[in-house]
Amino acid sequence: MVAKANVAGKKKVATFVIDCSKPVDDKIMEIASFEKFLQDKIKVNGKAGALGDVVKVSRDKSKITVTTEVALAKRYLKYLTKKYLKKNGVRDWLRVIASNKDRNVYELRYFNIADNEAEEEDE
């Protein structure tokens, strides 16, 4: 019985990272405004902006880290990231891709427009 109580007392903590290094280095987006957007828009128990102690959004240089103690879908962070990109008018140039290396990391990458133009010239 004692062992069950210890297992139930532990909180499952999930950490998600959104890597914005490419657009931030090119000065297309500001990491501070993206962090504020996430803090305002993430919903906890149906209320946006009421993160409390269960969800923490932090940044370091060009990465946003979301640490949560409640169930939060990784897909929800992708949705919010796309919403932010659309709001700032850069959704046409950037896309949100899950990293191959780590399951809890999203990256913002440019569409490969140069490759498409090269193919069109060959035809």
Image (cartoon, rainbow, N blue to C red):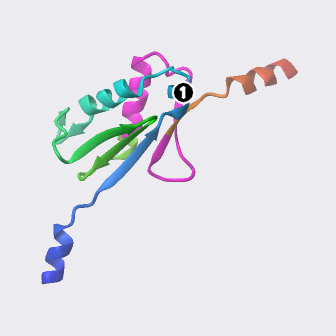
Provide the secondary structure element on which disc 1 rests. helix
Residue 109: give x, y in percent of width and height.
Answer: 57, 32
Pick out the residue farthest to the bottom.
1
Residue located at (13% from left, 82% from top)? 2
Vertical comparison of 17 with 2: above or below: above
User: Which sits in the foreground, 91 or 63?
Assistant: 63
Vertical comparison of 61 with 122: above or below: below
Q: Is residue 2 left or right of residue 116?
A: left
Residue 98: give x, y in percent of width and height.
Answer: 51, 44
Residue 34: give x, y in percent of width and height.
Answer: 37, 27
Q: Is residue 62 left or right of residue 43?
A: right
User: Which sits in the foreground, 35 or 110?
Assistant: 35
Image quarter hosting the C terminus: top right
Residue located at (42% from left, 17% from top)? 88
Q: Amino acid at mark 1?
A: Asp
90 drawn magenta: yes
Q: Quadrant of residue 114?
A: top right
Residue located at (43% from left, 29% from top)? 82
Q: Which residues are magenta?
A: 77-106
Q: Which residue is mark 1?
A: 25
Residue 48: give x, y in percent of width and height.
Answer: 20, 32
Residue located at (16% from left, 36% from top)? 50
84 drawn magenta: yes
How packed is label 1: few (under 14 Cα within 10 Å), some, or many (20 or more)? Answer: few
Q: Is residue 27 left or right of residue 3?
A: right
- Inspect this view and state whether residue 123 appears: no
- Numbered marks: total: 1
Image quarter hosting the N terminus: bottom left
- Inspect this view and state whether residue 14 appears: yes
